[in-house]
Image (cartoon, grey):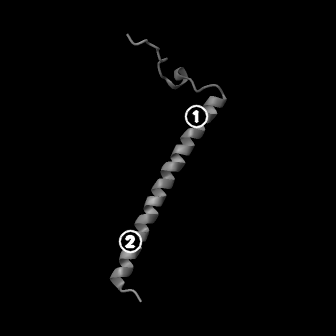
Amino acid sequence: MREAGQESSINVLDSLSELKTAQINFVDASYNARLSVYRVLRAVGHLRPQDMGLDEPTLTTAQ
């Protein structure tokens, strides 16, 4: 049988691991949600710089 101190340490490490996994899942879900929005905007023809309040990029040649 494990001692009380060892059991507590294992529980803390397990909890930290679960927390990190949840944080990774949150970031992944946030990325996927944002990507989905951009895909919808592209599908309806609104994924353009002017639709997002951005200036049109200007092409310049290096001299």
Crowdedness of circle 1 by 10 Å Cα count: few (<14), some, many (20+)?
few
Residue, disc 2: 12
Left or right: where does residue 32 sit relative to residue 14?
A: right
Up-down: is 17 above or below 24? below
Q: For the residue marked with disc 1, what is the amino acid?
A: Tyr
Crowdedness of circle 2 by 10 Å Cα count: few (<14), some, many (20+)?
few
Q: Position of residue 36 (x, y in %)?
A: 60, 40
Q: For the residue marked with disc 2, what is the amino acid?
A: Val
Left or right: where does residue 59 sit relative to residue 42?
A: left
Proximity of marks 1 and 2: CB atoms separated by less than 8 Å: no
Q: Position of residue 56 (x, y in %)?
A: 49, 17
Chain-order first, disc 1 or disc 2: 2
Disc 1 secondary structure class: helix
Residue at 58 percent across and 27 percent down: it is 47
Residue at 49 percent across and 52 percent down: it is 26
Residue, disc 1: 38
Name of the residue lying farthest toward the left: 5
Disc 2 secondary structure class: helix
* Picture quadrant where residue 62 is located: top left
Residue at 39 percent across and 86 percent down: it is 2
Instruction: Report the label total.
Output: 2
* Picture quadrant where residue 60 is located: top left
Q: Foreground residue, 33 or 3?
A: 3
Name of the residue lying farthest toward the top: 63
- Whole-angstrom CA distance, mark 1 to mark 2, is 39 Å
Q: Position of residue 5 (x, y in %)?
A: 33, 81
Q: Quadrant of the C terminus?
A: top left
Q: Position of residue 19 (x, y in %)?
A: 44, 62
Up-down: is 12 above or below 48? below
